[in-house]
Amino acid sequence: MNILDVTAINKTYTKQRWFKKSVHPVLKNVTFSLAPGECIAIVGESGSGKSTLANIMLGIESATSGEMIFREKTLTKSYYKQIRKEIQGVFQNSYASLNPLQKVEDILKEPLRNFDLPFNKSKLLYLLDIVGLEPSLLQHYPGELSGGQQQRLAIARAIATEPSILILDEITSNLDMVLQKKILQLLQQLQQTQGLSLLFITHDIQVARFVASRILIMNEGEVIDQLSKYQEPSHSLAKQLFQAVLPSHPSKR
């Protein structure tokens, strides 16, 4: 049984200028499923619709048409409110998602309060520990943390509600290679220990192959290819995306 089934999701934006109306399709019949404990990577160039899809799955935006089924029940607005704590997200700019006027302690308390979940200091220390942050950081502000620490804090806040699905939108793109690897290893650890299902959105093929068991390739709002981490793409546009990866050594570029 899948934890999430996404079926024929479409998203269009309509712009009205004077007497002329233009319709811009952003997502076109996006369909895939996510199994419990699975990590799927969605890969595509900028503007391919990846972030719009993430926003729809997180309830930030609504699809124009299509259906999402969570635990065999259609995700209507009313049902989404009931299971909101089950689907959480982490975004590219972690600092922008953190309130600079709140201490780390209050940032971690916020989602627990929002969902009327019990908490104490032990819970907050546990959340810090699980993402590899020191207990002393509870009284720090986000601006006093490094970029890697801010991203770990954003992850700690997202898992505070013990979600079933974590949606990660380009969360390593602003980090150097060493921090990228640490964050990816942390996510793999959380996937194993917490039983999380991960949807990892990225433009980086190498990152996708490191973290995911299955990769979906998007182009202009469509899923044009699906493959395992070890497979080569079959679609011509997907092949171009894979071939665009630079060799590791500058002399080979």
Image (cartoon, helix red, strand yellow):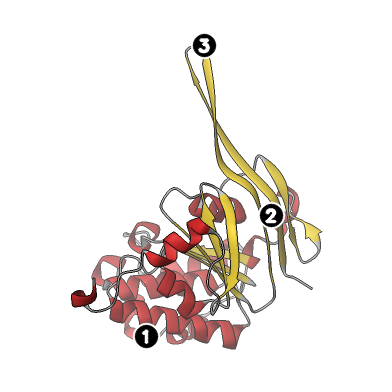
Tally the marks.
3
Percent across and percent down for residue 174 are 31, 65
Relative to the observer, which residue lies in front, 193 or 7?
7
Circle number at residue 81: 2
Mark before the other along the chain sequence, 3 or 2? 3
Classify 134 as above or below 167: below
Relative to the observer, which residue lies in front, 184 or 196?
184
Q: Which residue appears at 29% of the width and 75% of the height?
A: 247
**Distance Cα–Cα, label 3 vs label 1:** 59 Å
Circle 2: element type: helix
Q: Which residue appears at 18% of the width and 76% of the height?
A: 251
Mark before the other along the chain sequence, 3 or 1? 3
Quarter holding the N terminus is bottom right
Residue 136 visible, this orientation: yes
Q: Splitting the image into 4 quarters, where does residue 233 fall?
A: bottom right
Q: Which residue appears at 43% of the width and 61% of the height?
A: 241
Q: Which residue is mark 3?
A: 19
Classify 62 as above or below 110: above
Mark 1: give few (<14), some (14-19) or many (20+) Cα within 10 Å: some
Percent across and percent down for residue 238 are 50, 60
Mark before the other along the chain sequence, 1 or 2? 2
Percent across and percent down for residue 141 are 30, 68
Answer with left or right where residue 141 lies relative to residue 29: left
Circle 2: residue type: Lys
Circle 3: element type: loop
Q: Splitting the image into 4 quarters, where does residue 136 fall?
A: bottom left
Q: Which residue appears at 63% of the width and 77% of the height?
A: 38
Q: Which residue is mark 1?
A: 135
Comparing labels 1 and 2, the label whose residue is closer to the camera = 2
Relative to the observer, which residue lies in front, 34 or 45?
45
